Amino acid sequence: MADESHLPYITALVNEVLRWQPIVPLGIAHKSTTEGVYNGYRIPENSVIFPNIWAILHDEKAYPEPEVFRPERFLTQDGQLDPDVRDPAEGFGFGRRICPGRHLVFAALWLSVASTLSTMKISKATRPDGTTIEPSAKYASGLLSHPLPFKCTIRPRSKEAEELIRNTIIQP
């Protein structure tokens, strides 16, 4: 994590992953403890509320072309993190109910992405005749969202990466 400030694109990539396809699109159910009004809508006491995380993270005002996967949206022209772009941490909740583990999740995801990209080359799969197989960007819908299976090619970037993989895989 000491390298995070030197690798803004990795941070932008993780932010876009979290924004583009939130794992829990409707968030976690909450219960109102008092009556309230939000945007002119009355919310009775003891109402069950599901925050629409999908809508928050696909707000065109905050994220132009929200359906497009574009990590660069989190960067300035000079490639640094743009503090004016809304933090997609809202996918972890908001206000006093925000997930206390969000920093741990972000760090684990950031380390996983940085480690994978530094050691592996990920590319589109090819058919035996050499033509490219376009991966689908389809996701299962429901309470939890996850990508449907797709084909890709993952290869070590170097002999050192290959050796690292060989030494970390548990042999039977």
Image: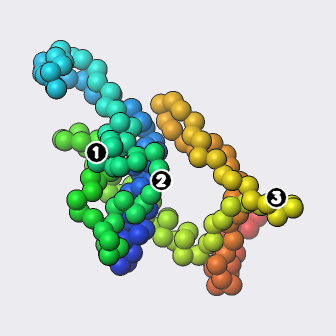
**Circles 3 and 2 in contact, beta carbons < 8 Å:** no
User: What residue appears at the point 26 percent right and 52 percent down from the top-left corner?
Assistant: 86
Q: Is residue 4 above or below residue 145?
A: below
Relative to 74, residue 163 above or below: below
Q: Which numbered marker is on residue 69?
A: 2
Which of the two marks, 1 or 2, is nearer to us in this view?
A: 1
Q: Which sits earlier in the primary sequence, circle 3 or circle 2?
A: 2
Task: Please identify the residue farthest to the right as the structure is shown.
Answer: 129
Q: Which residue is mark 3?
A: 127
Q: Quadrant of the N terminus?
A: bottom left
Quarter of the image for residue 76 reads: bottom left
Q: Amino acid at mark 3?
A: Arg
Relative image position of residue 73 (x, y in whole percent) = 36, 59
User: Residue 69 location, x and y as percent?
Assistant: 47, 53
Distance between the alpha carbons at the discs numbered 1 and 2: 16 Å
Label 2: how many Cα within 10 Å (few below 14, some 14–19, many 20+): some
Q: Quadrant of residue 57?
A: top left
Q: Does label 1 or label 2 sit earlier along the sequence? A: 1
